[in-house]
Each structure stands twice: as C-alpha cells, then as structure tokens.
Image (spheres, rainbow, N blue to C red):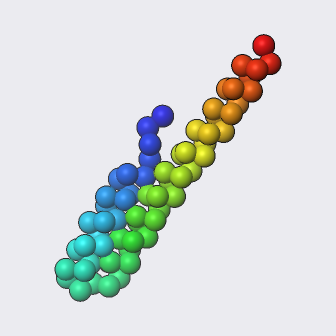
Amino acid sequence: MARRGGTDKAKGKAKEMTGKVTGDREMEVEGRLDQARGEAKKVQDKAREAVRETGRSTKRGRS
C-alpha cells in the first residue's frame, strides 16, 4: 500500500514558506494545517498496516 500524506506535507510546507515570505499569516497557518493533515494520514496508514499485520499473524497461528 502506498503511503499517504507526503503530498499534503509538501504542499503545506510550500504554503507555509510562501506565507512567511509574503507576510500572509493566513496562508502560513493553512500550510501548517496541511502539514498536520499529512502527518495524520501517515499515522493512520501505519495504524492500519499494524492491524493488518496483527490479523495476518493471528491467522497463521491458528493453522
């Protein structure tokens, strides 16, 4: 499964930096939110994968 979140993090960093350079505080905050959203997606994917792996190892143990 491909990891999600990297695009949001990159887009967020670009927005944050653009906001800093232009003095647009709202864009800077939007960028930070996008980065947080990307990180949350990564954590969610890791949790899903851990659940899948647990299910796989439990099925192997039943044989």
Residue lying at 25% horizontally and 73% vertically, measured from the top left: 17
Residue furthest to the top: 63
Residue furthest to the front: 61
Residue 30 locus on image (x, y percent): 38, 74
Residue lying at 39% horizontally and 71% vertically, measured from the top left: 32
| Number of numbered callouts drawn | 0
Left-right relation of 57 to 18: right
Residue furthest to the right: 62
Q: Is residue 2 above or below residue 28?
A: above
Q: Quadrant of the C terminus?
A: top right
Residue 21 lies in quadrant: bottom left
Residue 60 lies in quadrant: top right
Q: Is residue 37 above or below residue 58?
A: below
Q: Is residue 44 above or below residue 14?
A: above
Left-right relation of 53 to 29: right
Residue 58 locus on image (x, y percent): 74, 27
Q: Is residue 27 above or below residue 38?
A: below
Residue lying at 30% horizontally and 73% vertically, measured from the top left: 16
Left-right relation of 9 to 63: left
